[in-house]
Image: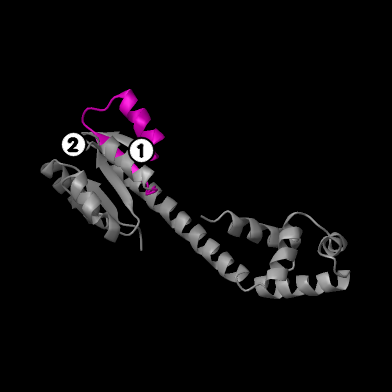
Amino acid sequence: MSAPVYLVDDDAAVRDALSLLLSTVGIDVRAFPGPEDFLSALPKLVPGCLILDIRMPAISGLKLQERLTASRVTWPTVVISGHGDIEACRKAFRNGAIDFLSKPVDEQDLIDAIQKGQAALERAAKADAERRETIALLAELTPREREVLSLVARGFATRDIAGALDVSPRTVESHRAAIGAKLGTTSPAEMTRLWIEAESAP
């Protein structure tokens, strides 16, 4: 199922028109009359694509975008404006927007941008699931196996690992076999990838 779309625009006519357009092509859309309403609902929302009007009372679309970025909410965002200018466009893209569209919004351009954002969310969700799986696999390793794996990831050969840990090469090979069984791979390159992936996880 594709990620939902959250539309934030203080213009009721625009909200209704875009909501109707997106729903007719099978996109799950939820509209908000302003940034405050969206921020109040945010803790309960699943990741999705954002459509933000650039000019709204109290909090502009760009300010909302900045707040979300500061809170590490980096969902794909399409910024729309009836008063677009180059500087606003630059700010939107600096804050991570995937597109900047002028009103009246071209229907196909908007749908294309949303589909691009949904594809990015799917890739991110897949990568996150893989990281979680890797972390779970590494959690099965003993402290000594983790030491051995960390040295494998640094490019150490069996004999070098034995010297570093003051154990026999046979013991190292035994540990590597156990690691391979738990991780599902005996490839040093793949072991290294899994180690780096887990170490770089937030």
Magenta stretch?
A: 72-97
- Give the side of residue 159 with respect to residue 1, left or right: right
15 left or right of 108 in image = left
Give 78 or 197, whichever is nearer the viewer: 197
- Give coordinates of residue 51: x percent, y percent: 27, 44
- In this orientation, which residue lies closer to the viewer: 17 or 5? 5
**Residue 70 in picture, x, y percent from top left:** 37, 43
Q: Is residue 99 above or below residue 133?
A: above
Residue positioned 71% across, 60% down in the render: 150
Residue 8 sits in quarter: top left
Question: Residue type at mark 1?
Answer: Asp
Q: In terms of depth relative to the viewer, which is nearer, 14 or 181?
A: 181
Residue corresponding to mark 2: 56
- Relative to the observer, which residue lies in front, 41 or 151? 151
From where the camera sits, is residue 107 visible?
Answer: no
The residue depicted at 28 percent of the width and 37 percent of the height is: 63
Element type at mark 2: loop
Would you name the residue on which mark 1 appears? 99
